[in-house]
Amino acid sequence: MSQERNMDWLHRKRVIYARNPITDIPTESTDLYDYYAEGTYQCYSLFRSKAKITTYKSLKWHFLVLYYLNYDGIEGDDLSLDDDMTYIFKFIANKENGFVTFYIKSSILNKMIKEVLGAGDTPPKNRIRKVIFKPKSWNLTLSEKLSIVGKLIGRGKKITKEVIYGTMLDINNLNNKITISNIASALNCTTRTIHRNMCNDLKKEKQILNEKV
């Protein structure tokens, strides 16, 4: 049986692991969502799905995001930032705590942590987001959310690879598997249209994104 992530520990430590955009201004904002026509890279949301960290690369990215989001220090903690974050990183990297699927050697982990601590407050590379749903949207069904995504992203646009990719990212951010059917549903077009515009790169990205859900 898979070990559940020990999120309570992060909450007790007051670790920040999610944040909405801070300087990017939404093109449209409602009680249910914020929409960024040009997209935003400033939305970070770790541990939102049940998928665990499966690679060194992903583990390091999680460390970089956590370091960036907590760069001003952990509230109520007198330890230095680097000492605090090292403690947190080692907790997350411990397979017994439910965040990763593998064991990592101390030497590799220490090297990774050293590299992350040297990154400063540079924003880590992140996926673009166009639609960010707010807490009030919790009672919307997946179909209703996909409809909103489709109307916003596909608004007045031809169904292109770029539009399909944006829709794929938003479906993934809703913590759902990406299928040709739900892409077509979101964009209010036929599955044939999606198939016709799905290049090999999009197919590979679809597989990668679905592995993380």
Image (tube, rainbow, N blue to C red):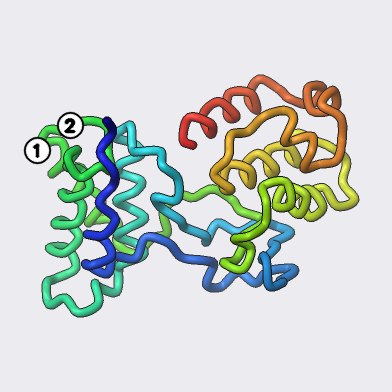
Q: Quarter of the image holding residue 28? A: bottom right
Which percent across, then down, holds residue 20? 52, 66
Q: Which residue is mark 1?
A: 106
Point 25% across, 51% down: residue: 6
Point 67% across, 51% down: residue: 141
Amino acid type assigned to the residue bearing label 2 in the image: Tyr
Which percent across, then down, holds residue 127? 54, 48
**Where is the N terminus found, in terms of image quarters?**
top left
Mark 1, Cα crowd under 10 Å, few <14 / some 14-19 / many 20+, is few
Q: Name the side, left or right, on which 99 lies relative to 33.
A: left
Q: Name the side, left or right, on which 57 lies relative to 48.
A: left
Point 73% across, 25% down: residue: 198
Amino acid type assigned to the residue bearing label 1 in the image: Ser
Point 35% across, 46% down: residue: 61
Up/down of 102 relative to 120, above or below: above
Q: Name the side, left or right, on which 85 lies relative to 137.
A: left
Residue 114, can we see it?
A: no
Residue 12, can we see it?
A: yes
Mark 2, Cα crowd under 10 Å, few <14 / some 14-19 / many 20+, is few
- Numbered disc 2: secondary structure: loop
Which percent across, then down, holds residue 19? 46, 65
Q: Nearer the viewer, residue 4 or 87?
A: 4
Which percent across, then down, holds residue 51? 40, 38
Q: How many numbered marks appear?
A: 2
Q: Nearer the viewer, residue 125 or 33?
A: 33
Q: Which residue is mark 2?
A: 103
